[in-house]
Image (cartoon, rainbow, N blue to C red):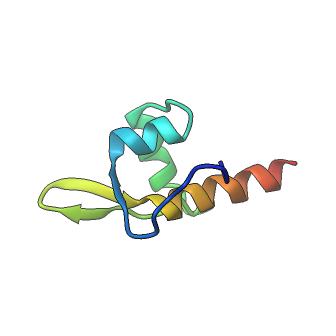
Amino acid sequence: MSEHECNPHRRIPAGTVRSLCGAITDMTLHRWLNNPELNFPRPIYIGRRRYWREAEVVAWLDARESQLS
């Protein structure tokens, strides 16, 4: 994931988050958000839509990858 060029200010929608995380389903994303042990980044709501800071999602994925190695 580190090779992915990410802007720390870029906001990405749920569909992009699911793709970055390995084409997970919306239900998996929901479970990750509701599992405090995973510490998945929290979304930012703009209106009724959810957006994540791309850099936070990539950092979370990198941290998970290093924990599994």
Name above or below for residue 19 compared with residue 69. Answer: above
- Residue 54, position in %: x, y? 45, 58
- Residue 29, position in %: x, y? 45, 43
Q: What residue is shown at x 39% (from left), y 41% (from top)?
A: 16
Q: What residue is shown at x 38% (from left), y 59% (from top)?
A: 52
Would you say 42 lies left or right of 6 here? left
- Residue 19, position in %: x, y? 47, 35
Residue sitting at the far bottom: 9
Residue sitting at the far right: 69
Residue 60 can be seen, yes or no = yes
Would you say 64 lies left or right of 49 here? right
- Residue 32, position in %: x, y? 51, 49
Q: What residue is shown at x 31% (from left), y 57% (from top)?
A: 51
> Considering depth in this image, is 10 or 69 the residue closer to the camera?
10
Name above or below for residue 64 compared with residue 23. Answer: below
Residue sitting at the far left: 47
Name above or below for residue 55 compared with residue 64. Answer: below
Q: What residue is shown at x 63% (from left), y 52% (from top)?
A: 61
Count how many numbered circles sit on residues in the image.
0
Residue 38 can be seen, yes or no = no
Would you say 26 lies left or right of 5 here? left
Would you say 62 lies left or right of 20 here? right
